[in-house]
Image: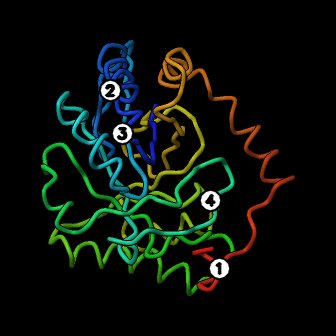
Amino acid sequence: MVLHFHSVSDENRGRFSRHMDDVCRLTNPLSADHRQPLTPGKRYSVITIDDGFQSANENGIPELLKRKIPVTVFISPDLIGTTPKWATFDGDQLENEQIVSVEDMKKWPDDLVTIGSHTLTHPWLPSSSEGEARAELKGSRDKLKQLLNKDADLFSFPYGASNENLIQMCREAGYRRVFTNSPKLAFSDPEEFVTGRLKVEPTDWPIEFRLKLLGAYRWMPAVSAWKRKFFPMPATSSSTRTQ
């Protein structure tokens, strides 16, 4: 299973730490760019963090490094160092979250922390024009490479919002793997291009987190489809993304 976090507050660092103990105890942690066949009969996990908030940098990444758990952090480079105000629709409380600086990212060890692309400005991509979407996809990768002097060829969709056209644009932009929010088992094909993930929180109950880690929440796509049908995300533009 590929899991993704957003923030890890001071008060929830202990819970996050215990979740990571479960990751090490119950699974073999892998990097998000893993491309080797998996050994049958073993359980594997991948930890990812979207947005690169300071709380995750200060409370989450140190716990991962302590346990030598690889992590991929997906960054929107035009928002580096800012406190974004994008819309949320799943209970996230992000109004006081600041995104890390370039200097912060350069301190992360390359052997355990991979930096991936998360578009330039975190839009709802399905509502973007083709030109806007291509600019967000290619521009993010190019800017991260310029800032960090290394490629960012992994990509996660903001809000998990994707479709076949956007996935094809990601191929054309040169990404090696893209991540959605569909909680299916990952890496059945070592060369797979589209990989699903499951959202987790430091506040998840211990049994809830363990069930997610072991793949018991793969029924969630049906719920997500129902949610999108009855509570669609409103179209966003440059003038509304920060509201």
Q: Answer with left or right where residue 22 lies relative to residue 207.
A: left
SS at circle 1? loop
The residue tagged 3 is 10
Q: Amino acid at mark 4?
A: Ala
Q: CA distance from mark 2 to mark 4?
A: 29 Å
Total of numbered circles in the picture? Answer: 4
Q: Quadrant of the C terminus?
A: bottom right
Find residue 17 and name its label: 2
Cα distance in 3D space between marks 1 and 3? 30 Å
User: Where residue 75 is drawn, which disc sits there?
Assistant: none
In the figure, is residue 111 to the left or right of 25?
Answer: left
Could you tell which of marks 2 and 1 lies nearer the N-terminus? 2
Looking at numbered disc 3 in the image, what kind of residue is underneath it? Asp
Find the distance from the CA under tag 3 to the CA under tag 2.
11 Å
**Residue 219 x %, y %:** 69, 29
Which labelled disc corresponds to residue 240? 1
Q: Residues within 10 Å of mark 3 (few under 14, many from 20)?
A: few
